[in-house]
Structures are given as C-alpha cells and as structure tokens.
Amino acid sequence: MSPTQHASWQRLRALAESWRKLHLRQVFERDPDRATRMTASAVGIHLDYAKNSLDQEVLDALIELAKDCDLAGQREAMFTGQRYNLTENRAVLHTALRQQTDAPIVVDGDNVLPHVRAERTRCYAFAESVRTGHWRGHSGQTITDVVNIGIGGSDLGPLMVCEALAPLADGPRLHFVSNVDGTHLSQTLKRLDPARTLFVVASKTFTTIETLSNARSARAWLVEALGSESAVARHFVAVSTAREKVTAFGIDAHSMFGFWDWVGGRYSLWSAIGLPIMLALGGARFDELLAGAAEMDEHFRAAPAERNLPVLLGLIGVWYVNFLGHSSHLLAPYNNTLRRLPAWLQQLDMESNGKTVHRDGSPVDHATGPIVWGEPGINGQHAYFQLLHQGSQIVPVDFILALSQRGQLDSHLPTLVANCLAQSAAMMRGKTAEEVRTELTARGMSAGDIETAIPHRVFPGNRPSNTLLIDALSPHRLGALLALYEHKVFVQAAVWNINAFDQWGVELGKQLASDIENRLKGNEGKQYDASTEALIALAAAQIERH
Amino acid sequence: MSPTQHASWQRLRALAESWRKLHLRQVFERDPDRATRMTASAVGIHLDYAKNSLDQEVLDALIELAKDCDLAGQREAMFTGQRYNLTENRAVLHTALRQQTDAPIVVDGDNVLPHVRAERTRCYAFAESVRTGHWRGHSGQTITDVVNIGIGGSDLGPLMVCEALAPLADGPRLHFVSNVDGTHLSQTLKRLDPARTLFVVASKTFTTIETLSNARSARAWLVEALGSESAVARHFVAVSTAREKVTAFGIDAHSMFGFWDWVGGRYSLWSAIGLPIMLALGGARFDELLAGAAEMDEHFRAAPAERNLPVLLGLIGVWYVNFLGHSSHLLAPYNNTLRRLPAWLQQLDMESNGKTVHRDGSPVDHATGPIVWGEPGINGQHAYFQLLHQGSQIVPVDFILALSQRGQLDSHLPTLVANCLAQSAAMMRGKTAEEVRTELTARGMSAGDIETAIPHRVFPGNRPSNTLLIDALSPHRLGALLALYEHKVFVQAAVWNINAFDQWGVELGKQLASDIENRLKGNEGKQYDASTEALIALAAAQIERH
C-alpha cells in the first residue's frame, strides 16, 4: 500500500500549501517558545529542530502518518529478526551486532548473539596481537601499517570511523584502498615497508572485482619484496565468508573473520568489517562504539515519537521530500574528523532509499530518498554555502557539531562553534533590503550605489535546518550518531513502504562491466548502443597503445 | 533582461514537453548515428554527449539561446579585461594568468601580463630553492614537508591539483589545513618535524579567521619547538597582498607572493595560490598546467558552439536545470587521484551560480545553479549509484576518465575503463521486465518468484550522461579539464544573466559568526532568534567546562 492513501498524507499536503508561504522569521516572531519545545536529546546528542518549516500541527500529522504506516510494527520486525528484507528473504540485524543485553535474537531457530560475540572475540584477539606486537610479519618485525582493501560498505564505514576517532588512535597506521584504479594502491604502497605492513581484504564473497584486483596486486608486491609465497599468511587477513577462496589466496583460515547474511554491507562496520577500527583503536574503544549505538537503538525502540531522534529526523525529511519538494539533503559536520561522515551517509541513505517500488512491488506514486551530500561545514561556508543562502533551490541542512574532542585546541573552539551556530541563524532569518540599506548607509555608501547593491546583498532566508550538538566526539557518541542516521533512514523507508535493505540497482552495471571488460581485452561480447560502442573502440585503441 | 524573454527559451520549453516522454533507448534505436555526430574534442579531451536527452533540434535552440543572451559578447568582455564582475566593479582575468601569447591585456591603462609573469617567476624561484634544498629551515635543514594553510579557494584548488598529479610529485610532501577545528592542525603537525616544515599561509587580506587561527597556532608550535621567534621567517611564507599584516606576523616581505583583485578565490589556483603545486611538482609542470588551460581558453574563445566543449556542457546543463527540472549534477571521476575534483567544482559552480538576481539586480524567474556533488565513480557504484539507477529523481552525470596515468597498473586498467563505460550504458538503456524475466528464467527461478522479483529488478533507464575520455592525466590535460569546467560555469551564468564572480551570500554568516563568537566569550552582543539563543547558551556552558 502506498503512504499516499492515508488520510494523514492528504492532511500534510494541505498543510504544505500554507507552509510554502510562511517565512521562518515570522514563525519565530509569532512563537518564540517553539525553540524550547522543538528540541530532543538522547545519548549525549542534543537536537534542535526549531529552525524547520513546520509546527506542532505538521509534526502531529507526520507522527500520525508514521502510525498509519505502522512504523512501530516494522521497527519491531527488524529488531526481532523477522525476514524484513523481503526481496532477499533475510533478517536485518545490524542491531544484534551491538546489543548489550543477552535477550536472544533467533533466526532460523538459532540465537545469533553467541555467534556475534564469539566472532568479535576472535577479531579483538587478533587486533590485540597486532597492536601489542605479538603478531609478527614474515621477517619477524612488528606491524606498523595496515591497509584495508575493500569497497562500498567494506570501505566507507571503517574509513569514516577511523578518521572520526583519529585523535584517539594508538595502533598501527591505517590506510584504505578501494578504487580499482591502480594509482590508489600504488600511491599507498609507495611509502610502506612490506615487512611491516598488514593487509585486510574485506569482501564477503571474496569475488568483488575491485577488491580482488587490489588484493592480488598487493600480494604480488609483498611476495616480490619478501621473496616468498609463504609470507602471505603473515601479511594478509580476510573479512569474508568464502573460506575456500580465502585459503586459495594464501590466507590462513584462522585469519578469516566472518559475518552473516543479515548484515548489509552499508550496515556492516559493527561486524568484523570494523576490524580496521579495532586495529587502530583497540577492542575497548570498539566496545564503546557499540555501546553508544546500542543506547541509540534502545532510544529508537522505546522513546515516544515526539522525543525520538531518529523518528523526528526521519519525519522532518519526509516532510521536505514529499510535501515541500526539496530533493536533496546536506550534512554539514563542523568537526574536521567527521569529514567522511557525508560519504558514509550518502551510501547509507541513497543505497537504502533510492528505490521506486513499494515492498509489494507496486510502483511508488511519491518521491523517495533525497540526494545526500556534504563537506565539512566550515569549508562549505567558503564554497558552496553561497547557493544555500542565495540560490534558487532550498536545501535542508543538518548542522553537526561535537563540542569536545582530543586535539581540538581550546583557542580555536569558539570560532568553530560560532560559525556553526551563525550559519543556521543566517539561513533561517536572512537579511532584508532594509537591513542592507541601513548597513550600507552607515558605511557611507551613496544612495544610488546602495539601491544598485541591495538586490545582490539581500538574503531571502527561510532556509531550514536541524542542529545536532554532541557533548563529545567519543567512540560512544559516534556510535550513537551513526545509529541515529541508520534509524532515520529506516523511518523514511518505513513511511515510503520501500525495502531499504536490498540494492538491485547495482546489478546491471556489474553485468555490463564484466562484459565490456571482455570486449576491451579483444574478446567477443554483446553489442551496445552506438555511443557505448564508439567509446569502447576509442578506449580499446588507447589501452592497446600502452 | 531575463533569458526567459527570448523566443528561443519558449521554443525550448515546448521541446521539453516531448522530451519528457521520450526514452533514450528509443532515441538511439531511431537514430544510431547520433553517436557519431554528438561528440567533440579539444586538448586531448573527447566528449561524447550522445547519451543526453536532447537532439539536434534542442541543441540548435540552445545555441540560439546562447546567441540571444550574447554569450560571445560576454565572453569577449571577460577575456579582454572589461569590468565584467560588475557588483564588485572588477575585471575577471584568471585567463590572463595562463595566457601564452604576449597580446596585452589592459586594466586601468596597465598591461597585466608583465605583473603576472614577474610574480610567477618569483614563485618558481622560491619553489625551486625549496625543492633543491637551497632554502633551509632555521636550524639549517632542508624542507621535507609543506603545510598549506588556507580555506575555500586558497585550499580546494591547490589541494585538488596536488592530489590529481600526486604520482608525478617529486618535491616536499604537501599537507593542507583549512578547518578551524583544531584537530585539523594538530593531527597534521603530529607527524611533522618542525625543523623541516614550511608553512604557506594563503589569505589575500591576511584576515580570514580560520586561516589566521591556524597560522597563529602553527607559529606557536614552531617557535616553541625551535626556540626562537626568528625561526618564523625561515618556516613561513605568505600568499597575500596585505604586506603590513604579513610582516607583522614575522614573514619576510620577500617571502610574500601576491595576486590581483581580478582573480577570484575560486579561480585562483593559476596564481601564486598555486604555490603548493609548484613546490610539489616544480615550475615546468606548473607551466604545462597553465599551457593546457590556455589551450582550452583558446578553444572556448574560437570554436563554433556546436564543437565548443564548454559551450556544449554549459548548454546541456541549462537544458536539464531549466527545461527538464533536474536540480543536481553529479561529477563521477573514475581516476582515483581526481577524487577531490568534485569538491573543487562544487565551490566553482555553486559559489558562482548560486544566485537569484540578474546582473541588473532584477529577480530571476528561472532556476539557476544546480547542486554539484560527487565521489569517485567506481566507489559510487558500490554506494549511491543505486539511487541514480532506481531512485525517484534523475541526476545527469559527467563520467570522467583519463586513460593513462603514471602508477595506473596495466592489469587494473580494463576493469576501470569497463566500469565507467558500463555505467553510462546501464543508466541510458536500463533493463526491462522482459529482460529480467528472461534472465531469471534462465537461472531456473520459478515463474511465481520471477513475477514477484521483477518490479524490484527492473531499471527504468533514460538516465542521461556525458562521458569525457582524456588521453592522459598529465598536468597539461588537467589544466584543460579545469578550464573546461570554469568556462562551462561561465556559459551558464551568461545564459542566466547572473554575475558568476561575486559571492555576497557568504557575508551574512561571517558577520553573525564574529558576533556570536563574542557572545560565546562572555561579551555582550546582538540577540538572536530563540533557537539560536538556546544553542549559544548550551554551547557556552560546555565550552566553559573545558
């Protein structure tokens, strides 16, 4: 069933009419108390959502819509291990990876928790052996550098967390190679000592072509440098479930760490895919990351909608996408170490909700996932924020700022904080012609020049945003923040009645790529459209010449 | 005057009606020759634009629109040094920074070329002295690491070029610090030896608060480590025009490199702002970069519209933004070292064209700049490409692939190329229910399961894209590619009749930030909306506690 069939949807459409004409500046003038009401907190994260183009009436209707769409029932189906990912006939249990209690979660008659914890114990033990120098390379030296080879969910999650918590890192240096473009690997290896480098090859099936190409080239580099095939077992481990392929590669079966089909790639950093995080930070900090996420899980599961952070963020997003027509969403983290958070969320959100059929296969009659993008906010201020302030489209923003972090430099902090708060204020209120006139008059500009200047210097305002203030950028809070966004994405999928946990949209490209690669190597293959044929010919000729 | 007043605009609106109903697959079936016609090349860059939702009739109308908007006249006004940036009463002459001929360009009665070349000679000489080890640090050691401190245009351009050409780098290691969040600086300095580190402080006015905060903290770190204020002159240089502020900081006036008010920040990598590039790669390669850009400038200035790469890309973009309603644009570079190209273009495009008043101050009655975003394409395939294939909005894509680069690894190249070409083919053609049925039947799936699966596995296709194949990722070709996008942005601004060269939209945030920073430090200041006031109070209390 489409959410558009619910009375609450129709009600929201009607409400949107008047909100298209309202300016947030007026809204605040009429009801300053909204700032007090429109906040919610959980797990050290304070959400201020007062600067959004909505009020209690809209929020009530959105919460009604969530009820109509059985958000609560869908949520329980996920948490309790039902086959919620119905197109792949799988449970969806990344939350089990971080569950702190022992309440069993049963899939196919089997409690998954003991498996989760046993595998995590293996990962921690391995990470610890590398971190303490107990694990040695082929020539007896300790490991100083780890290269994670993976792509998509096997890259973005661990990379983002390692960056986010870099000031706390006390293990080997981490590097991430994902692109099959050989420069990614060759530039990374340039500065590494093979005798002291460990490779983590992350591919569930051990067939991902980008990852395996990089793994094979890394293997060749290592074997050539260390002079022996037997070095592979001391310098390569795998995060995979394909035992035969892994051992054929030369990796010891004891050095293979697994996960389960109910962990989607983009939700996998909590599993063995997080091995790079454990190597960089240690098991204790990984435990904190999990605990923070679990606390957010509990909040999501238990808190009433009007105080539930993922529900609020999700519904506000639905309001913008479906009723006010804003098709993109900006994530503006102000902490520099969160600079890869947007790329991680981009995968999480767009791969989950970039769908156009309902769970039952009927075509959607409403917009779904927005484009999610972003760069650190303060850099954005010196770049693309121009369009946010004065461009022709409205982009709802999440401002994210953690107020404490190791290495933050006390003298810089007020500037960082002030800029973050100033942007949301500026976007909301704007600047009127009268304000510009007053300012330029005070600067002594002539009346004629002022009138010419005004239209260029007016800010329309009425640009909505959320602000998330986090008390500290600790592993615990980061875990909570990531779980918050995971569940936000879930909420939207539940309302849209789409399956957030499959990704059929990546299949076609893979098929064609394998076929075209054959063509480029001079073999026979399918014929494509005339443009693709011409490009294949042109590229093949150039590759030949190398 | 608004472009919507032209007959060509109305004609395009009419044409768009039918294009909304056409599928590119049909279009190719009816007219396969379009693949031959719809290509253009310049400076080693081959553009295939056949996979766009347009034909010759649309293209003719777009070219007519460009004529109606006096694109050619506006272009000449820029190249010849007219005060084309009229809201700031300045010429726009980044092209003069790379001009290869001696044809004078006169601003205020003065030929700018001798100044450009003299300053570049100074930059090259300094870079060479560092690269050869002639320039020594305070304790007599050579420089191994350079930290560029700048933000916006003083960061994104040089950073992107240094990354793009990293396999050719043979100078000191480059680092870039931009975010005022202290972790950016402290994490960078962690691994550096003060005695062998050089800082380039890039700020035209030497007042940019983020840059100066970082510069002051870097200075304190250096002075503490080297034990003397006099060390500053051997470890800091400036790219700036504020001589007094620079020398007060402790930088020698001879170590200050300047540029001019007719170089906008986002167009400044060709000036002394490119000093990090010169340090990493040397003057000869910087010369190649300039020469490639200059060749593209000549192409843009002279080639007929139908073979003019920037004109084509610009007009195709106008078609999508204004007539088919696509509000974002994805840049998908396949070469890994181009990974920061989207961030650079994001600033270039969104800061230039995120405007809603015409040059004369009248409000626009049409959409302007799109949201520009992107991550390396092959990573995108494992992430957000799901939405591109099966989501509810259409995102036009530029696929960018250079077919040769040092360090590319021959064995990886066919995979990289195949993936790039496969994606544009898949997006264009899609996959029909019948194709899915045939495929799943061949795999032995039951008829009932097949019908359930089909809607989830169908790809609607009809997703448009450009493909840019570049013969090699050399400095010369990179220069051409960057100039191509600079001029693409220019073309769109010329059609929209907006000023692409000011950025008033960044001012308000700066004013408020300075004011709120005062408040956070416990001083009096303006009152804000209730939400901002609450956030200020919350943040101030936390900062206090540190």
Image (cartoon, coloured by chain):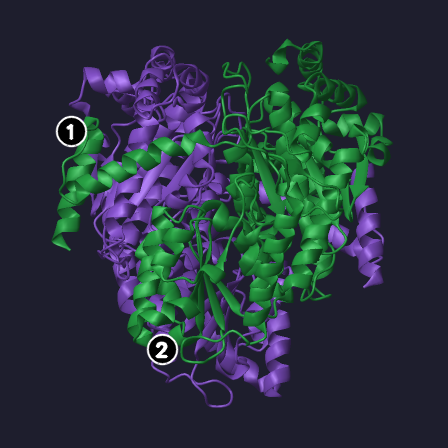
Chain colours: A purple, B green
Which quarter of the image is occupied by the N terminus of chain A? top left
Location of residue A305 by image quarter: top left
Q: What chain is tagged by disc 1?
A: A
Query: Which residue shows up at 71% across the image and 21% down it?
Result: B66
Query: Which residue shows up at 60% across the image and 75% down it?
Result: A219
Q: In the displayed structure, would residue A375 be above or below residue A205?
A: above
Location of residue A469 by image quarter: top left
Disc 1 marks a residue whose amino acid type is: Thr
Q: Which residue is mark 2?
A: A131
Q: In the displayed structure, would residue A155 be above or below residue A533?
A: below
- Tell which of A529 and A454 is nearer to you: A454
Image coordinates for residue B249, horizontal then vertical, percent? 35, 58
- Tell which of B84 and A215 is nearer to you: B84
- Tell which of B219 and B317 is nearer to you: B219
Query: Which residue shows up at 32% across the image and 29% down it?
Result: A426
Bin the neighbour count of mark 1 within 10 Å (Cα to Cα): few under 14, some 14-19, many 20 and up.
Answer: some
Q: Which residue is mark 1?
A: A36
First in sequence, mark 2 or 1: give its number.
1
What is the secondary structure assignment of the residue under circle 1? Answer: helix
Disc 2 marks a residue whose amino acid type is: Arg
Q: What chain is tagged by disc 2?
A: A
What is the secondary structure assignment of the residue under circle 2? Answer: helix
Q: Can the viewer see residue B414 in this picture?
A: yes
Image coordinates for residue B301, horizontal then vertical, percent? 75, 34
Q: In the displayed structure, would residue B49 be above or below residue B140?
A: above
Q: In the displayed structure, would residue A84 be above or below residue B58?
A: below
On the rendered structure, is A305 left or right of A374?
Answer: left
Which quarter of the image is occupied by the C terminus of chain A? bottom right
Label 2 and label 1: CA atoms lie apart by 47 Å
Residue sitting at the far bottom? A140
Image coordinates for residue A363, horizontal then vertical, percent? 54, 25
Residue sitting at the far front? B109
